[in-house]
Amino acid sequence: MINLDGLTMFVSSTADNGVVDRDTRLHLLQRGHRVAARYAGGRVARGWLIGRWDGETLHFRYAQREDGSAIHAGHSACQVHQLPDGRLRLIEHFVWSTRQGSGVNIFDEFR
């Protein structure tokens, strides 16, 4: 299990139906197998992730308030990899529960 506690990540790639972008920052907190994050930026005014590690997969539920006060939510499964420069990359496979669609977002550690 990789420790994500204290990391800040940015979006390096997003799905066509995703609302996060390069201005979105995730701030992660981890206690044991539990992981939480708050995020904002781009079209997201404020968002929260809460989840846990299950083996090498990180499972999240998320909710976010977007521009115009819309609130949307969903769930995701993520893999975390180490990049050649030592930074971490989180690959998120998400499914919306409040709108149609699914996709993949990629978050990279911000240094």
Image (cartoon, grey):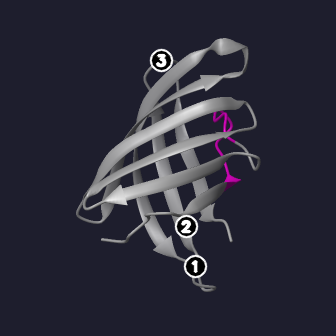
- How many C-alpha atoms fall within 10 Å of the one at disc 2: few (<14), some, or many (≥20)? many
| In the image, residue 78 above or below residue 47 | below
**Which quarter of the figure has residue 78?**
bottom left
**Front in this rendered view, residue 41 or 93:** 41
| In the image, residue 51 above or below residue 48 | below
Numbered marks: total: 3
**Which quarter of the figure has residue 44?**
top right
Which residue: 49% across, 51% down? 92
Residue 49 relative to residue 84: left or right:
left
Please identify the quadrant where the N terminus is shown.
Answer: bottom left
Q: Secondary structure beneath disc 3?
A: loop
**Front in this rendered view, residue 11 or 100:** 11
What kind of residue is marked 2? Arg
- How many C-alpha atoms fall within 10 Å of the one at disc 3: few (<14), some, or many (≥20)? few
Quick check: marks 1 and 2 in contact, CB under 8 Å? yes
| In the image, residue 68 above or below residue 6 | above
Magenta residues, as a range?
Answer: 11-20
Q: Which mark is residue 83?
A: 1
Magenta run includes residue 31: no
Please identify the quadrant where the C terminus is shown.
Answer: bottom right
Coordinates of residue 53 in the picture (x, y in percent): 28, 57
Q: Main secondary structure of the magenta part?
A: loop
Coordinates of residue 41 in the picture (x, y in percent): 72, 39
Residue 3 relative to residue 34: left or right:
right
What kind of residue is marked 3? Thr
Q: Which mark is residue 89?
A: 2
Q: Secondary structure beneath disc 2?
A: strand
**Residue ID for mark 3:** 98
Between marks 1 and 2, how big is the CA–CA gap? 7 Å
Which residue: 42% across, 61% down? 79
**Front in this rendered view, residue 2 or 98:** 2
| In the image, residue 43 above or below residue 57 | above
